[in-house]
Image (cartoon, rainbow, N blue to C red):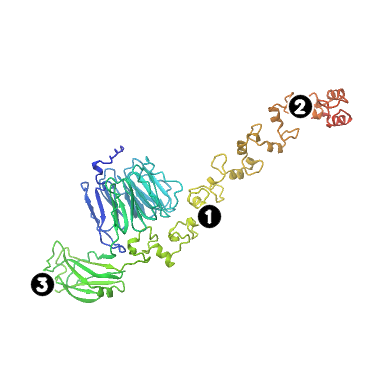
């Protein structure tokens, strides 16, 4: 496929980056998520939104395509499909998260693997082999980012601006985001790291930003949600995308388009639940639905009933029962229709006092019964739906004046139990041994010993020889580091003086001759560091050659061959120092102590300090020298 042409910053194509904005329908409160529908607006010329049966749990928007994750783990996609970005693979399997780049789509499967399809000119869909288990994904313009279960970040695809050059020693990461040409990471300590294209300062994280709980990356700007519910933004602000409105908070979630920013504001906590279509209703065919796990109410509730039924006569109506008690309200007595195209609707207010009693056990059962003249089969497409909505009593476990539901997100409630981590810790439900405000169970514990890795590293109880923020044994276990000698220390941290990626100690273990002097150092490296240790340049330490019996006739610790090479006399070129031959009495250097040598010795008899022949070193040729001479008689 030919490379796409670049898009100009102010081109009309980018006048609004998200050309098909997708939103989750507002059918839930801060602590009350149900299956959701999808609404979309903007440029829709490429296709219409599919019928998704209102079972959407997550959505993502690319440049001209939209992706939805359904509550059964399947993926739907619609919009521009010129690069196959909406060709969801067959047999994809259950999916837990989705992301959309300009022209590619990414899915995180429930087994921790990553699938990708669509435009792949820059390799953005070439998921690395041996990626390991992934817990989160993000899609930039033309690059893909994955957060692994060990807190490290992987990236592949377009890297012209270094957006895939994950910083070394980044440390454990809890969340990731990908912008047009930059990448952002939220670290375990609440700080933000950023790399890639920085022409607008989108990677210039503000000083004194403070603890952050969520991040988002736009085309050329970066957004952070702080732990106090306020929003910080930096980078390109040509369209006011970083002009955070005053008095915005408290904010519970953030998102970023190419040239705009979105924040979800905390509102009064409430529940809003629906039964879905219970089917046709009629005489002898009542409809009933039980709302369960209901929280305490703070105000009256609104019960909404939508029906398509045989209700056009005054004698055709519905009666209402709440937890088995008949209510005074008769529904649809007047003004209803007979099988209308648009369902008839009735609302009932349940006063707070009554509601409090009804939901005291966390359950409310609503039953609708039809009068005798209502025929259940009258309408071919009969329908009956019941919905309940009311404001709930705020929960503020940390007593900061903000409902917990407004603060809970994947970072502040890491174990997903709908209780703020800080409250879990304060109550003793969760431990926090390193006092960093994060339950130990949510921190990385690669060796599964019950202690966060960060704590072990800080205490020095677990080694991290390469200072990458990971315990050595875990680097080895995950395959990030090799340990060829199985001594528990990554090979990269052990001595490797010859640069062959094999620890010196392991080489010596396999072949002890490589360390002839047994000083736990390879001979070749000792020689490289001090060439004088191998005077004859044969790759062996002189000391070891001497110990093995190599010639050092004058016992001065230097090989005879090296002395000769540097100028010592060896007139007969036999590899033996002449001085050593003279010391034996071989004055003519013929390899034998014989008559000719005796003649030489006698010729200098009695000479004091002679040039040769003083075999006992007393400074004079005498009988003592003759005795030594005769003792050496013959060939040697």
Mark 2 or mark 3: name the one nearer the start of the chain.
3
Q: Secondary structure at mark 2?
A: helix
Using the image as rendered, state which of residue 259 and residue 477 is in the foreground. Answer: 259
Q: Residues within 10 Å of mark 1 (few under 14, many from 20)?
A: some
Q: Residue at x 33, y 40 (%)?
A: 121
Q: Residue 364's x, y, as percent? A: 27, 72
| Residue 66 x %, y % | 27, 50
Q: Give the residue pinned by disc 3.
A: 314
> In the image, which is nearer the foreground, mark 3 or mark 1?
1
Question: Dividing the image into 4 quarters, which one contains the N terminus?
Answer: top left
Say if 584 sits above or below 109 in the image: above
Mark 1: secondary structure: loop
Report whether residue 470 is seen.
yes
For the residue carrying disc 2, how many other residues have a C-alpha within 10 Å: few (<14), some (14-19), or many (20+)?
Answer: many
Give the residue displayed 44% in from the left and 49% down from the top.
170
As displayed, is residue 345 above or below residue 117? below
Q: Nearer the viewer, residue 255 or 71?
A: 255
Q: Name the N-terminal-most of marks 3 and 1.
A: 3
Q: Which residue is mark 2?
A: 578
What residue is disc 1 on? 462
């Amino acid at each position: 496929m030919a490379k796409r042409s670049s898009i100009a910053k102010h081109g009309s194509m980018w006048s609004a980056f998200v050309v098909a904005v997708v939103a989750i329908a507002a059918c839930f409160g801060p602590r009350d998520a149900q299956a959701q529908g999808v609404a979309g607006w903007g440029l829709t010329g490429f296709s219409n939104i599919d019928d998704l049966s209102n079972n959407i749990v997550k959505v993502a928007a690319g440049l001209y395509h939209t992706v939805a994750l359904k509550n059964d783990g399947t993926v739907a996609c619609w919009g521009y499909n010129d690069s196959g970005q909406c060709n969801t693979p067959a047999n994809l399997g259950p999916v837990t998260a989705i992301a959309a780049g300009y022209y590619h789509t990414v899915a995180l499967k429930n087994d921790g693997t990553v699938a990708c399809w669509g435009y792949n000119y820059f390799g953005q869909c070439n998921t690395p082999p041996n990626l390991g288990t992934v817990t989160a994904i993000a899609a930039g313009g033309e690059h893909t980012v994955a957060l692994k279960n060990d807190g490290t970040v992987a990236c592949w695809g377009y890297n012209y601006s270094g957006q895939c050059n994950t910083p070394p020693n980044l440390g454990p990461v809890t969340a990731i985001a990908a912008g047009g040409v930059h990448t952002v990471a939220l670290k375990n300590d609440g700080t933000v790291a950023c790399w890639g294209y920085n022409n607008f300062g989108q990677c210039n994280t503000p000083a004194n930003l403070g603890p952050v709980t969520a991040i988002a990356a736009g085309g050329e700007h970066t957004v952070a949600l702080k732990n106090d519910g306020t929003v910080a933004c930096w980078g390109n602000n040509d369209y006011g995308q970083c002009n955070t409105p005053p008095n915005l908070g408290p904010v519970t979630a953030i998102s970023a388009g190419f040239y705009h920013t979105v924040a979800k504001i905390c509102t009064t906590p409430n529940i809003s639940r629906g039964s879905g279509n219970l089917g046709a209703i009629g005489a002898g065919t009542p409809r009933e639905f039980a709302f369960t796990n209901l929280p305490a109410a703070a105000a009256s509730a609104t019960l909404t009933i939508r029906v398509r039924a045989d209700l056009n006569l005054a004698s055709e109506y519905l009666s209402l029962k709440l937890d088995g008690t008949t209510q005074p309200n008769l529904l649809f007595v007047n003004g209803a229709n007979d099988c209308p195209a648009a369902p008839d609707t009735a609302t009932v207010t349940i006063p707070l006092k009554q509601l409090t009693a009804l939901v005291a056990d966390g359950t409310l059962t609503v039953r609708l019964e039809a009068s005798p003249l209502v025929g259940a089969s009258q309408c071919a497409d009969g329908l009956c739906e019941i919905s309940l909505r009311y404001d709930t009593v705020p929960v503020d476990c940390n007593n900061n004046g903000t409902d917990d539901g407004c603060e809970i997100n994947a970072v502040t409630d890491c174990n997903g139990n709908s209780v703020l981590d800080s409250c879990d810790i304060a109550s003793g439900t969760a431990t926090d041994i390193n006092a960093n405000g994060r339950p130990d169970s949510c921190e990385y514990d690669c060796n599964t010993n019950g202690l966060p890795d960060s704590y072990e590293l800080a205490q020095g109880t677990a080694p991290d020889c390469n200072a990458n923020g990971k315990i050595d044994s875990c680097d080895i276990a995950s395959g990030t580091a090799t340990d060829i000698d199985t001594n528990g220390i990554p090979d990269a941290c052990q001595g490797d003086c010859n640069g062959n990626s094999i620890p010196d100690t392991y080489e010596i273990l396999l072949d002890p001759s490589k360390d002839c002097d047994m000083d736990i150092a390879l001979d070749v490296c000792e020689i490289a560091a001090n060439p004088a240790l191998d005077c004859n340049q044969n790759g062996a330490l002189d000391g070891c050659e001497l110990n093995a019996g190599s010639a050092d006739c004058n016992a001065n610790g230097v090989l005879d061959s090296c002395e000769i090479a540097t100028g010592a006399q060896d007139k007969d070129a036999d590899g033996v120092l002449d001085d050593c031959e003279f010391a034996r009495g071989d004055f003519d250097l013929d390899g034998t102590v014989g008559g000719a040598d005796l003649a030489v010795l006698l010729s200098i008899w009695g000479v004091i300090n002679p040039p040769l022949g003083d075999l006992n070193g007393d400074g004079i040729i005498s009988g003592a020298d003759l005795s030594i001479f005769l003792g050496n008689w013959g060939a040697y």
